[in-house]
Amino acid sequence: MKNKPSSNLVQGIGTFGALALVFGSMIGSGAFKKITVMSQGLGSPTWVILAWALAGGITLIGALCNAEVASQIAASGGQYEYFKRMYGKAFAFMYGWTSVAVIQTATIAAVAYVFGQSLHQWLQLPEWNSTLSETTLPFGIQPLKDLPVKLLTAGLIVLLTGINALGVRLGVTLTSLMGSTVVLCIVLISVFGLSSPMANPALLQNAAPSTEVGASDFLALFFAALMAAFWAYEGWNNVGFVGEEIKQPERAIPRALVMGVGLVMALYLLLNLTFLVVMPIEQIQGIPQNEVAGISIMRYLGGETAAAVVALLILVSTFNATNTTVLTAPRVCFAMARDGLFFKGIERLNSRTGTPVRALMLQGAWAIVLVFSGSFDPLTDMLIFAAFIFYGMGAAGVFVLRKQNAGEKPPFSVLGYPVLPALFVLFSLALVAVSVWNNPMGSAAGLGLMALGIPFYLIWRKL
């Protein structure tokens, strides 16, 4: 049943470390930023909370499905190895290619860039006003625009790549410490806000949208709010990438997935409930898009000191989210190279630390290219729907594996089988369809990026 290739990867991650990788990958800046756009679209505190709850519930169902699969296939590369077992090498390669080329590297670039922006503002560094900032390369790329922020971002990626090259235990220890700090701070901020004299539960009583809209228009607004929330929940499945480096993975990964997603869902609901009871939604709607809503709300609640605490928390959370992705994601191209479906030599491990240093370096270099190109935001926007193609196929894999292992009970069984996995697959299909309908050009571009991997697959398969 188990598919665990032999290697020299170090099994240095315990259950708590795996749990820290889950919530560390998920908690970045989204929980502090997305409430503005969600409030502007929905106009109602009740509906905003429902959007967070529904997105969290759907993510938890996906995590349950992923947990059953992961309990049977504890291999480095996570979803790549799952798909190879369930659907064959071609589909697995398409996932791996998309992940390495865009999804994970663009996520590293995007989250690290938020860290760079926040640190730049925190240190009050001078703005970059050189005429060179307008230098434009083909495709509208401006590599020198916002140069100080880009340099800070690249510096973070280099630093974390170096730290994780020193060994998986060091990277996981850093994630455990910083992730636990973030969780504690969110709880303390929420307690501070909810116990404040400014907290007013009556602000939640506006249960209707602020403007009269038709049912179809409101569904579109609610869907947009869900997409914003899903971005904040993104990263929950990264723990599977390091399956071979987790002790007793058939037990630790399912526990980490279920507990981690449940914890983050509770934290997001608590934090956003706090925001909505201390500031009227009309004022939240007026927060400029270039400002972090959480900072503005805490400034409204507790002055500059409270705002500074949240700003520092965002620095810590984006640092940690970048670290967890830098740590876990290179295992995908490592696994592909081990199968001969990626650049030769990427599968080599450092003889002293047992880490895929070459994969780490390749990932870091490409993420920095995306930072200076400024293309990471459009790339992630184009491929949000692609993530749910793979999520849906992952949940469908529960049925595939049960058929392959007829009569053999998996180490972890998803609750509500077969209803919950089927519902998640149907939701993923619906989300992909709506995304394509709402943004056909962006979806086509995303599929085009995925298709760029086909000639590489044909070449590497023949080597």
Image (spheres, rainbow, N blue to C red):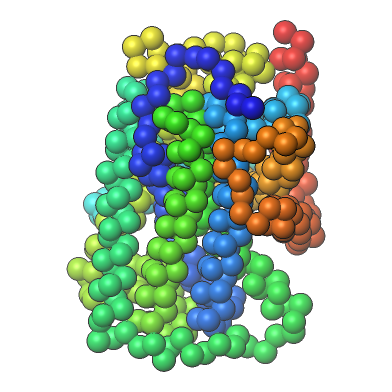
Q: Quadrant of residue 131?
A: top left
For the point 56% across and 74% down, which residue is it? Answer: 50
State the residue in front, 364 or 185: 185
Where residue 440 appears, as percent x and y from the top left, is 78, 54
Residue 143 in sight: no
For the point 35% across and 42% down, which residue is it? Answer: 16
Where residue 214 appears, as percent x and y from the top left, is 74, 84
Quadrant the N terminus occupies: top right
Q: Is residue 256 left or right of residue 452?
A: left
Residue 47 in sight: yes
Q: Is residue 426 left or right of residue 118?
A: right
- Residue 23 vertical placement versus 439 (above, below): above
Where residue 310 appears, as percent x and y from the top left, is 29, 62
Q: Residue furthest left?
A: 305
Q: Is residue 239 left or right of residue 301?
A: right
For the point 26% across and 80% down, which residue is it? Answer: 195
Quadrant the C terminus occupies: top right
Q: Is residue 233 left or right of residue 274?
A: right
Q: Quadrant of residue 272?
A: bottom left
Where residue 417 appears, as percent x and y from the top left, is 68, 53
State the residue in front, 77 or 263: 263
Q: Quadrant of residue 429?
A: bottom right
State the residue in front, 50 or 198: 50
State the residue in front, 277 or 420: 420
